Image (spheres, helix red, strand yellow):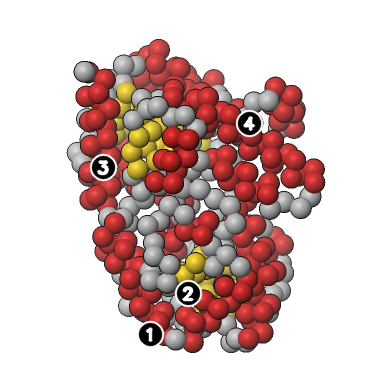
Amino acid sequence: MRILQLCYKPPFPPVDGGTLAIDNVTQSLLRAGCDVKVLTVCTDKHPYDESKIPPEYRKATSIEAVYVDTNLKPVSAFVSLLCGESYHVRRYVSKAFECKLVEVLRKNRFDIIHVESVFLTPYVSTIRKHSQARIILRAHNVEHHIWRQLSMGESNRLRKWYLRHLSLTLEHYERDHVNDFDGVMCISDNDSIAFKDMGCRRPMATVPFAIDSSKWQYDGYVEPMSLFHIGSMDWIPNVQAIDWFVEKVWPVLHCEVPQVKLYLAGRHMPKRFAESSFDGITVVGEVDDAFRFMASKAVNIVPLLSGSGIRVKILEAMSMGKPVVATSVAARGIDYSDGQNILIADSPEQFTTHIKHCLMDSQFARNIGLSAKKLVCNQYNSQGQTKKIIEFYRHIINADCT
């Protein structure tokens, strides 16, 4: 099977949840023996650095990248505002990327065009003109859900209004264009339901993120009484989450458990975090080895207040056997059992209680972690994901032929 994978940011090296999810699909297709071609957008926020891509990866994917300027432009944003169009999507419209796409389609025949994210939907019409391949949307999130939740948590009235406007225009775009594809592949059942509620009439499949648990084994030193959060800090929900935790949870927790330490890691850490001095909090920033950082700490906290899809870092922490304390928003999309393989906390009091329980009762924390690891091994393994992807592709291809 010949696949063209269109990406809204470079999938390699996988440095955040989005790139991990994209690379996850790429590796699954390669393992299945598919012929995969990767064409990706690259931006100032997500640059393409060929020197960081292994030769075997370049050879296997024939990866090519086209720069698209997605930086905020006030005039363009204002035009989108007046026209009522989604500025999120408008930023990805590029003549250069369209020309490269046409060139690739003219030179190659594909069975499936796999489109990563709704942001690349404007290129569907170009694909239809130059290819007979079936087009699949891989929906990483229900994008407008994230922006709606962000607007709800915003206190500044003007910013709240604009975030609400962004969520509405993005919702209209998703509703209007979800049926442009031949099939939709969601990352969670919750997202599949949301797309159906938006009027999706195309075949759908839920294919969650997959974890190779064998890569997440660690027998080194684990710092006692330690918490950690890791995530790209140029993603607004992560910043909002840490702001909330530091303001609402940390003062009480640190007062009741003075020896507890919190480590904050992630790319593009805001200066105000790096330059602040919180008692008991260490701002690590970007780490060279995310696996070793996560493995060396005791408890993972994920206090997201907005989000969609699946949080990859939760699954990774679970696969290590780490107890995870997270909001119900953060854990959405994961087939968890609260109190068995994860601890759900939606208030400062719940966060404090669950974290203290994990820190003070090592056997309890160990049991939560082992159950979490079992969940990941059983339900989020790479073999299962690969099978689901290929079966869905074949279903779409065969459905078109009947």
Task: Rate crowding at label 2 as few (under 14), some (14 to 19) or many (20 or more) other CA atoms within 10 Å.
Answer: many
Up-down: is 352 above or below 284? below
Asked if residue 76 can be seen in this view, the reply is no
Question: Alpha carbon of mark 3 to alpha carbon of mark 4: how far?
Answer: 32 Å
Q: Name the residue under label 1.
A: 363
Q: Which quadrant holds residue 70? A: top right
Residue shown at the point (74%, 45%) measured from the top left: 160
* Residue at the disc numbered 3: 388
Asked whether 81 or 290 is in front, the reply is 81
Q: Quadrant of residue 63?
A: top left
Marks 2 and 3 sit apart, C-alpha to C-alpha, by 32 Å
Q: Crowding at label 4, few (<14), some or many (≥20) Cα neighbours within 10 Å?
A: many
Residue 400 falls left or right of residue 226? left
Q: Distance between the residues labelled 1 and 4?
A: 49 Å
**Residue 169 position in % (x across, y down):** 63, 31
Residue 24 place in picture, x, y as percent: 35, 47
Q: How far apart are marks 4 and 2 (CA)?
A: 38 Å
Q: Which image quadrant: the N terminus?
A: top left
- The residue under label 4 is 169
Q: Mark 2 points at which residue?
A: 299
Left or right position of 76 against 393: right
Which of marks 1 and 3 precedes in the sequence? 1
Tell which tag, 4 or 2, sits nearer the viewer: 4
